Amino acid sequence: MKLNIIIPAATLAVGAAGGFIIGQSNSSSEASSNSLSELPTSSKRSIATSLSGPASTSDRRASSRPESLQDVLSTPGQNDRIQAMLDYYAQLDPSLFESEARSLERLPFGERMIAMQLLFSQWGEKDPITAMSYTDSMGMMGRFVNGTVLKSWASTDPVNASQYYLANSSSFDTNGRGPSPAGTIASEWARIDPKGALTWANSLPDGDQAGAMRGIFSQTAKVDPSEAALQAATITNEDARSQAYQSIAREWGAQDWGEAQAWINTLPADARDEANAQALRGLAADNPKLAAENVSLLPDGDEKNSTIRNISQQWAREDPAATALWVMEQESTDAQGSAMSEVMSSWARLDNDGAIDWLNNQEAGDVRDTAATAFVRNNNSKEYDISLQVAETISDEGTRARSISSAVSTWMKDDPEAAKEYINTSEYISDDERERVLRRATSTGGRGGPGGGRGRGGR
């Protein structure tokens, strides 16, 4: 049966998450890099000036370079503050980097992470050996920034960076998380000397070679995918060649879907499915609707399900209702569930009422439960009644209990006695789950639930 959600009139709050992009000034016009993003910054204009163009901002910076980190942190405006930090580290003598790194311990976590990325990027270009030595003294945090040093070093001196990596590879163990260090070096090397990068990658052991090929061809395919394809065909290691093909397919799919398809059709049969999946993901970044129309190219299975989820994530940002309709036309319930989690993550933020209307018209089951859980997690309505009522309609007992504890957590902060009374008496929570729901809601303390509101009165 369909589970209807009756909600009170609610104020819809559409939130916009602010963000920032960090660039890195680089003496080489061909090798600009940063571990958080790729943004050319050879111009000394501020990020804010690049976006809005007020001459007064750059004029003011040119006449008053920051002389200390305190000056940087006092700069109004987040974009100007990041640019000031970049400028400050760029003009420092390398002998001062260690004392600057030690001073970062006093900063709040968010500012410390930004500053560390910018500082160690500069350090990696100007004195990488000392920078690497310092990261060894930083414990777990050293694993976080030694990749930044390696990337920055490789952007200007890939030969020596590669030699250092091979002699100290155990220091860069990512445990399967984050980019491959060999791939990082190879990607930067390919900006300067693609053939040299390929020669180095071919000399690597199997464990590093695939990551290096992925890095090289992700970069070279941006410039000339057809030439990259010719180079990839010469790779003798099967796994490395497969990684190269996938990187090319993703970039080519983003640039020209028709040409990418023509090339993929020339590949050996056992390479086409993975290449098609990557090409569809590249296409989805700019044209998710067209990617959705072509997902039938993939055979049923995990690769197709994962691609459907990826397309859904992109498309739902533009049109969650159309995306949901397409998702529910897919035959795999696994694909439907994972994709609807992505769709509802956007839909609950963009169109609260539309998301609830969709939920009201779905049959009970795993797919609806997954979507409802994502709604509760992402609903930004100021009235947390809405999330709680959606959570109550989840059919799986354990999933329902976890979602209710999330939904009630803000209420626990605003009115703990009323929230506890609800938990202790609600018909939607089994006796076996009550204690766990109360413990989770209390420990969350409102941090993980939807926004505060008016409580449960009037239901």
Image (cartoon, rainbow, N blue to C red):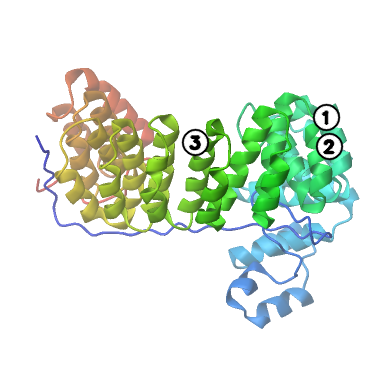
Rendered location of residue 28, percent (x, y)? 83, 59
The residue that appears at 22% across and 26% down in the rendered structure is 396
Measure the alpha-carbon separation of dots 2 and 3.
33 Å
Q: Which residue is mark 3?
A: 273
Q: Amino acid at mark 2?
A: Ser
Q: Which residue is mark 2?
A: 162
Which residue is nearer to you in this view: 61 or 236? 236
Rendered location of residue 157, percent (x, y)? 86, 47
Looking at the image, residue 251 sits to the left or right of residue 121; the answer is left
Which residue is nearer to you in this view: 169 or 102? 169
Identify the disc placed on residue 166: 1
Measure the alpha-carbon separation of dots 2 and 1.
6 Å
Measure the alpha-carbon separation of dots 3 and 1.
33 Å
Q: Amino acid at mark 1?
A: Leu
Which element type, helix, strand or loop, lies under badge 1?
Answer: helix
Q: Are marks 2 and 1 in contact (CB under 8 Å)?
A: yes
Rendered location of residue 264, percent (x, y)? 55, 44
Rendered location of residue 41, percent (x, y)? 72, 64
Which residue is nearer to you in this view: 30 or 341? 30
Residue at far bottom of view = 55
Residue 149's place in the image compared with 258, above or below, is above
The residue that appears at 79% across and 48% down in the rendered structure is 194
Quadrant in which the N terminus is drawn: top left
The residue that appears at 27% across and 53% down in the rendered structure is 321
